[in-house]
Image (cartoon, rainbow, N blue to C red):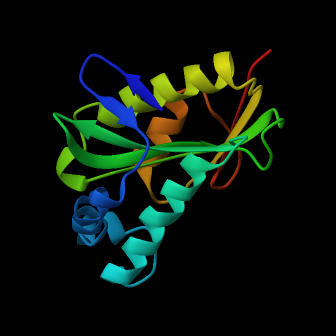
Amino acid sequence: MELRTPRLVLRDFQREDTPSVFAYQSKPAYLKYYGQPPPTEEDVIAFVALLCRWAEEVPRAKYQLAITVEGRVIGTCGVRKAAPDDTVAEYGCELDPACWGHGYAREASRALLEYAVQSLGVTRLFALTQPGNLGAIRLAESLGFLRVADGRYERIHP
């Protein structure tokens, strides 16, 4: 699967993406809101392997795509349904802190959310954020999500 925007390519993960994911997920700025120690290399290998398995499922319910700039993985953006026929999905996005502030997360998210609504039949999305993560909160709100509880945002499509 692949989605293109003016600056980005969103695509299914490949096992070769592991070093890039490990590099950004190990940065202190990335870890600030997670409240856990940096991942081990084995943790990230397992994470990327999971995302690769999701991409191979038929029928597919989870679309967690690599965000790439000029072929380099800088994050991930996803829409995950519990079952392929569901119309409700969880949205999430993470980005290498070195790429924050360039609009990449918003650009990737808009493309994926449009795909989810138009092609996957998603009518309701929810996102979870850490209350202190102002960047994630601003992103969710800029994408049309409304705060329904501390750290929980929803977006409904008619």
> Depth check: 132 or 4 in front?
4
In the rendered picture of this protein, how many numbered marks are placed on residues? 0
Q: Quadrant of residue 131?
A: bottom right
Residue 139 visible in the current orientation: yes
Measured as percent of width and height from the top left, residue 141 is found at: 54, 33
Q: Is residue 54 left or right of residue 148?
A: left
Q: Which residue: 63% across, 27% down?
A: 116
Residue 125 vs 83, above or below: the answer is above
Measured as percent of width and height from the top left, residue 47 is found at: 46, 68
Q: Is residue 145 left or right of residue 20?
A: right
Residue 131 visible in the current orientation: no
Residue 62 vs 154, above or below: the answer is below
Q: Is residue 80 left or right of residue 103?
A: right
> Depth check: 112 or 53 in front?
53
Q: Which residue: 78% across, 37% down?
A: 88
Q: Which residue: 31% across, 30% down?
A: 9
Measured as percent of width and height from the top left, residue 107 is found at: 37, 26
> Depth check: 31 or 90 in front?
90
Q: Which residue: 35% across, 70% down?
A: 32
Residue 125 vs 15, above or below: the answer is above
